[in-house]
Image (tube, rainbow, N blue to C red):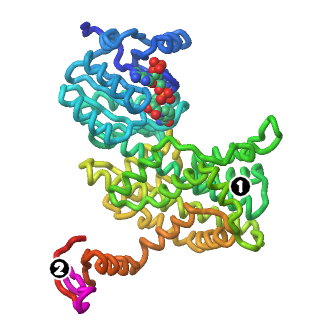
Amino acid sequence: MSSAGTANIGVVGLAVMGSNLARNLASREGNTVAVFNRSYEKTETLVTEHPEAGFIPAKTYEEFAASLQKPRTAIIMVKAGRPTDAVIESLMEVFEPGDIIVDGGNAYFPDTIRREKAVRETGINFVGAGISGGEEGALLGPSIMPGGSDESWVTLGPILKSIAAVAEGEPCVTHVGHDGAGHFVKMVHNGIEYADMQLIAEAYDLIRRGTGKSPAEIAEIFAEWNRGELESYLIEITAEVLRQIDAETGKPLVDVIVDQAGAKGTGAWTVQTALSLGVPVSGIAEATFARSLSSHPEQRAAAASLPGPDEAFTVADQDAFIEDVRQALYASKIVAYSQGFDEIRAGAAEYNWQIDLGAVSKIWRAGCIIRAQFLNRIADAYAAEPELPALLTAPYFADALSRGQAAWRRVVIAAAQAGIPAPAFSSSLSYYDGIRADRLPAALVQGQRDFFGAHTYKRIDKEGTFHTLWSGDRSEIEAEDTH
Ligand SMILES: NC(=O)c1ccc[n+]([C@@H]2O[C@H](COP(=O)([O-])OP(=O)(O)OC[C@H]3O[C@@H](n4cnc5c(N)ncnc54)[C@H](OP(=O)(O)O)[C@@H]3O)[C@@H](O)[C@H]2O)c1
């Protein structure tokens, strides 16, 4: 094998994401990019259509390895799952110790942990890197969340910094943590994205049904909101979508689109992982379930005759109601992000990752789908108190919640009275009330558990673990802690 390769980076997998990422890499000073795809036509098309990129095409994995400088660095952008394993196996056959394999696909983080362990045993480095921003981000600058070893970051860091999005002069990439940390954080990013989208959708639905405004009129409201504290990519594109008129029917496009939301699984992964970690990500869970509910047309058809409220929903003061919805949206958004960051903190503790939560919020400020000014406030909160127990308790957010809570409650009440589903708004409010509660009915749940399962309980007034002899004389005894 030749060691005289000229490319400092390679890309394997040249479908839409891989070819855009390869073009992004090639456009940056100092990069020479080797490219490989299982079927050669895609490689040929890319190289022919973009002569300016100076790509070094390879027909085989051997040629690909030979075209790379050492340590060889290759980013895989293929279908997640088995195809990723197949490519890793092929690269391991032609790479050498010290080389770096990066999986830039949407891998499930336990797969990344497994792959990193297996690849590391050969002396080759493996980095799972979450890449967010879709096609456009890959081409113009994504937000990148790499895991992997410190050694690989030395080589990879400058390359990824050269292609990442830039927010306020800082590249949107940081070494998130070891092995699966990058894909874990990308997963939670997507979970938060689900919650944010659902909250925006609920806000739209409430305004539309409460005020009778048209999608185009509501688009103007979102455009206005985008100039304030809610400023974000998702609010911006919501206005664009609501403004769009279907060319065929002349109706608002949103009224022509079938109301069944799809999902690629990252929201479900976020919720499943949170359940195992014992972290209540209720906003993300409700958003994921809301998509599931929408996608059961047979059940919805059967349930369509179930009664709703008797009275029609009308809003007396439209402007006041719209402002209430805006505040409810902001408060619920704070809860969703707080829950997502909790999950990252819990994941870091479980998997022994040193994750800087402030740095994570900063790399989400540009390039990715949840990009927003708001993320600066999160970075500030963690800078002021790195061990913040819950994001929503940081002074800035606590103040925002306190200002917004009356409006938030009015909106949840209005939704319930009007029979308009607002699962993310209402579950976020319940979370807020739960987490701030002086006492929770969890005490009763513990009593019930002790009654039927002798699961024991703690007392507020003395140390120890206790059990009541429910089927005996109902006296209390000291017991072993069985949780
Ligand atoms: N971050 C984002 O916003 C975002 C958006 C979209 C996708 N993604 C992720 O990025 C990755 C690439 O996405 P994509 O949409 O560009 O492509 P894709 O449709 O997910 O995958 C197509 C690519 O995988 C290759 N492939 C499939 N099976 C293979 C195998 N067994 N061995 C070798 N190569 C194989 C294909 O090669 P052939 O041409 O030979 O079939 C093609 O290059 C995926 O993991 C996806 O989840 C991320």
Residue at the spot 51% in from the left edge and 65% down from the top edge: 428
Residue 473 image-quadrant placement: bottom left
Residue 312, image x, y percentages: 77, 70
Q: Position of residue 351 (x, y in %)?
A: 26, 49
In the image, is residue 466 above or below residue 58? below
Which label number is shown at residue 479?
Answer: 2
- Say which amino acid is labelled 2: Ala
Where is residue 38? Give x, y as percent.
Answer: 42, 16
Residue to which mark 1 is pinned? 221
* Quadrant including the C terminus: bottom left
The relative height of residue 300 versus residue 147 in the rendered view (above or below) is below
Provide the residue span drawn in magenta: 461-475
Asked whether residue 350 is drawn in magenta, I would say no
Q: Residues within 10 Å of mark 1 (few under 14, many from 20)?
A: some
Q: Nearer the viewer, residue 429 or 397?
A: 429
Q: Residue at x 20, y 22 (%)?
A: 97
